[in-house]
Image: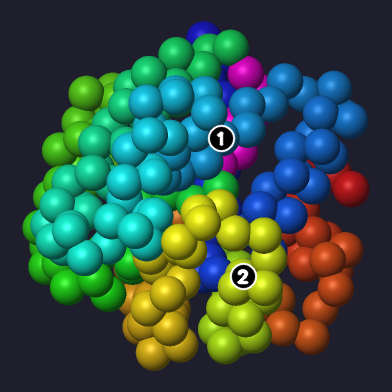
Amino acid sequence: MKKAIYICLEGTEGVGKTTQTQKLVDHLRSKGFKVLQTKEPGTPLAPLTMQLRGIMLDKQYDDALTAPARELISQAIRSIHIDKVIVPALNEYDYIVQDRGILSGLAYGTACGNDPDRLSFLAEYVTESARLHLNDGIYDSIIYLKGNTSAGLQKALSAKQEFAAGDAMEARGQSFMEQCSSNMDDFSQAFNTTTITVDGKNIEEVFADILRALNIEE
């Protein structure tokens, strides 16, 4: 039975994940492949996850949330996404291409003050029912786009904001993003990850690196 190839693009703010996700989806579709495009935390493919995303990331709720509360919302989003969107798509698509996933969850969740072992346990728990259909590491490939955190944060802050009050993660500033990047470096070793440096490269150069890493024809 056919199973979609599940690819996740990762990285901290402003490194080009969303741009490269869209380019990869468009490229694969131009080759005739059937591609599901999705994201975490929160996807329009599962509307409830977008409501939960707002609570988790809208800065207006930041003071009302605790670190564990934010994390449990994140894991609820992942549970719904994996079980209701990803698993049903596995036999319907050639590729699933996702913007952010478990690696970001571990990196940002730890930077927010959660214990990394508990985060790993929760991620395994909420994906347990889907692991019969997925690889043990969930994704077939992770592309980790790594760049200068200061430049990336400034780029993200200057872009159109999703929330009127701002993004709770971006609002934590440069030192927080540096910690997230360091965490991502560490956690990426537990996954099937290819790290691609984006600094000094244009969009097309980064995309060419991604295609090579995934062994996809240009």
Q: Position of residue 62 (x, y in %)?
A: 27, 62
Quadrant for residue 185, please give it.
Answer: bottom left
What's the amino acid at mark 2?
Answer: Ala
- Judging by the rendered image, the residue that carries numbered circle 1 is 38
The residue segment tinted magenta is 93-98
Is 92 situated left or right of 207 in this image?
Answer: left
Label 1 element class: strand
Whichever of labels 2 and 1 marks the residue nearer the N terminus, that label is 1
The magenta stretch spans residue 203:
no
Which residue corresponds to mark 2? 156
Residue 41 picture quarter: top left
Taking 58 as reference, is 213 left or right? right
Q: Amino acid at mark 1?
A: Thr
Q: Secondary structure at mark 2?
A: helix
Q: Mark 2, mark 1: which one is toward the viewer?
A: 2
- Residue 95 sits inside the magenta stretch: yes
